[in-house]
Amino acid sequence: MRFAVLVSGSGSNLLALLEAERSGALAPAQIAVVVSNRPGVLALERAATFGKPAHVVDHRAYSDRLGFERALLDLLQLHQVEAVVLAGFMRVLTAQFTDRFPLRIVNTHPSLLPAFPGAHATADAVAHGVKVSGVTVHFVDATLDGGPIIAQRTVPVEDGDDATSLHRRIQRVEHQLLPEVVAQLARGQLLCEGRVVRQVHHDAQ
Ligand code: GRF
């Protein structure tokens, strides 16, 4: 299954995916293309290091969200993409985009959703005083961080944590979990009934 990875920043999750692909752990998922909405980000360099096609579709070049998304969709079509990973991609996608890949877009979010959706999840968790946070990998629909939850792992919040230290601890976990889920999706192991996602195992004959 050919995946696009959409990024906006440092791309540490992208790196985890690229390394998983290189080790064979991502199969049968293949990273076909990496797309950033911001030029000059480290994620693009990481993609290039692994010999992946990497493109910028700068959202600022489009007068509205729909134009930006159309450009993204055209690029993904060119690369025959069948599924999408959002790995630190900081733009909200509308139904125009998400309806093209039903149950074929996954995102990693640094909290235990539905707690702390949005762009400041770790800061919000620290400010709220929760003792446990974590990672959520979920399907993406047109709602903000609201699609069906595929997998979650807990991460403790420690005394003295700030948003950055908590995020760093969470990222170590998401670097494991996201590639695992991408491989499961590509193997057809994720079954979604309503909001509930189950992992099914196809027994070897
Ligand atoms: C990740 O922590 C992810 O949960 C959030 O954005 C961050 C991106 O980090 N959506 P990176 O670009 O993968 O390093």
Image (tube, rainbow, N blue to C red):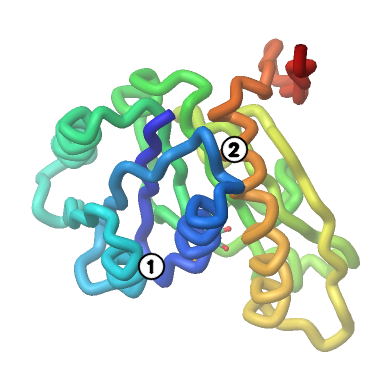
Mark pair 1, 2: CA separation: 23 Å
Residue drawn at point x = 27 percent, y = 51 percent:
35
Q: Looking at the image, is 165 positioned above or below residue 39?
A: below
- In terms of secondary structure, where does tag 2 sit? helix
Callout 1: 10 Å neighbours few (<14), some, many (20+)?
Answer: many
Query: Which residue is tagged 1?
Result: 9
Q: Position of residue 194 (x, y in %)?
A: 68, 12
Using the rendered view, name the quadrant where residue 200 is placed: top right
Q: Looking at the image, is 92 positioned above or below residue 12?
A: above
Mark 1 and ligand 1: say if the CB distance to the nearest ligand atom is below 8 Å: yes
Residue drawn at point x = 48 percent, y = 64 percent:
15
Residue drawn at point x = 32 percent, y = 28 percent:
97
Q: Position of residue 61 (x, y in %)?
A: 9, 53
Amino acid at pointer 1: Gly
Residue drawn at point x = 69 percent, y = 33 percent:
149
Q: Position of residue 205 (x, y in %)?
A: 76, 12
Query: Which residue is tagged 2?
Result: 183
Q: Position of residue 5 (x, y in %)?
A: 39, 47
Q: Say which of marks 1 and 2 sits in front.
A: 2
